[in-house]
Image: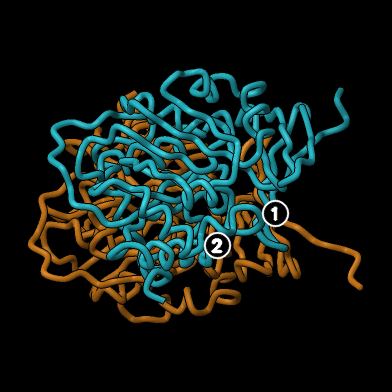
Chain colours: A cyan, B orange
Amino acid sequence: MKLIENWFSERYSDNLQLSFRVKDQLLSVKTDFQRIDIFDTYDFGKLLTIDGTVQMAENDEYIYHEMITMVPYYMAEKVPESALVIGGGDGGAALRLLELGLKRIVNVEIDNHVVELSKRFFPEVSKSFSNSKVELIIGDGIKYVSETKEKFDMIIIDSTDPVGPAEGLFSPAFYKNASRALNKGGVLVTQSGSPFYQPFALKKAKKGMESAFSGFKTYVAFIPTYPSGFWSFTMNPTGSRKLDTVKTGKYFNKEILEGSFKLPTFVNDILRS
Amino acid sequence: MKLIENWFSERYSDNLQLSFRVKDQLLSVKTDFQRIDIFDTYDFGKLLTIDGTVQMAENDEYIYHEMITMVPYYMAEKVPESALVIGGGDGGAALRLLELGLKRIVNVEIDNHVVELSKRFFPEVSKSFSNSKVELIIGDGIKYVSETKEKFDMIIIDSTDPVGPAEGLFSPAFYKNASRALNKGGVLVTQSGSPFYQPFALKKAKKGMESAFSGFKTYVAFIPTYPSGFWSFTMNPTGSRKLDTVKTGKYFNKEILEGSFKLPTFVNDILRS
């Protein structure tokens, strides 16, 4: 009889937490940027946390990664061929972009440890980094967009929450520089947090987007391992291209492409405030 | 300095739980049907649990109650005037139906304690029971639909999960009897659980609906205090009526009326299996 149970808990506030029973803690490391932990959970497979917040779970990463890539891919005015990923050190966004047929992906991740740990513990997700179409740069995404001369059809901000190292990725200055690296008709998208627990993240993303473009569009997805189970993404407004068919993922499909932009009133209220 | 913290945890599986920090446990009672607890939480106000599962939280009950009433209200072929609510002993469904203008509501709740505790701890929700348009019957909803001669424009199954007292509310026999109590062009809707943690509930609801009607329609909502934060509702297919405007709730709006029927692929897969 096993008497000791081990649980990892993420605090969503001082007064609410989600707890995963874990078989084992596989690793804990403090890097120059953040603390990273890897757990082997019973219900969600391997779990990567940064500063105590769930970044990726083996069993539901498909939702986040499909939604941060497939929605903007089909919202771009022309079929995208190139993408810049800021963050995304697990390789999951790059992987979906490769599956969508992109020819060049530059992935700028600030923390080499995220990449190394993903290669070790999430090989099926991080295998994108061994594809020759993917250029991995370990460096500061904020600096990168302020200096690059290259332009992309898609820019994906796959960051942690807007505190700590990712704070600058929600600033108007960053959005301005990023918009200069975007081809005409292209799409820039950022994860913008849980509308329920992090309305400030959504507001910041909206304001940043509005500072660089003529407006914004927000869409949402259900992600069980993220706070409140409900997540937002915010992009620049784009014209649309004619879509005959769209690829179907395990979450994403043509109906979701349309339905994910239809927001509950309380989310509209956050975006209007 | 307060050294003791009190938490209520709902286990979603043996290996996952959501925990609410509580100011106090206000009541715990074992009735003939179930165990009911009332907590005063920090983040979600008062919380009603049945057999350890969250039924209603003061701060997000609007999502569940709007979605189980407003969506079917606008999906009925004619403007509904009468409704039968099975379960719903907190009065929240009846309250929204009154706000929508219904003229007669019969509410059949099996457990008198749910009603009494809601009157005491959730007076703003349960005030519907003092409205003369609402007839409250303490009794078995399964028996009621098998005996009633009355017909309704809407039938709402606002039950607990399909284990214990609510199990029969997911059976083909119940759906058959309920469909006989439904006016032509009317709508029958049931909560059908978390697609993520309770795919069996969704499958049961779908099969029950198909046994009594020509098919089914499933729609979803984000509910932070329910397992995985993602909930499903299943109704009979209906013709549609022309809608000029729809009322806007704190969650529900015209966009949600359309978007909530657009399902992730993994939900479609459950419904096809």
> Based on the displayed image, in which of its 4 quarters is residue B251 positioned?
bottom left
The amino acid sitting under disc 2 is Gln
Residue A1, placed above or below residue A55: above
Horizontal placement of B38 versus A185: left or right? Answer: right
Residue that carries the numbered disc 1 in the rendered image: A11
Q: Which mark is residue A49?
A: none
- Badge 2 crowding class, 10 Å Cα cut-off, few under 14, some 14 to 19, many 20 or more, is some
Q: Determine the residue located farthest toward the left in the rendered image.
A: B242
Residue at 13% from the left image edge and 33% from the top image edge:
A244
Is residue B143 visible in this depiction of the protein? no
Residue that carries the numbered disc 2 in the rendered image: A198
Residue A111, placed above or below residue A118: below
- Depth check: B96 or A39 in front? A39
- Depth check: B229 or A73 in front? A73
Q: Are marks 2 and 1 in contact (CB under 8 Å)?
A: no
Residue A62 coordinates in the image, percent (x, y): 46, 32
Is residue A212 visible in this depiction of the protein? yes
Chain hosting mark 1: A
- Depth check: A19 or B90 in front? A19
Horizontal placement of A51 versus B3: left or right? Answer: left
Mark 2 vs mark 1, CA separation in Å: 13 Å
Residue at 33% from the left image edge and 81% from the top image edge:
B132
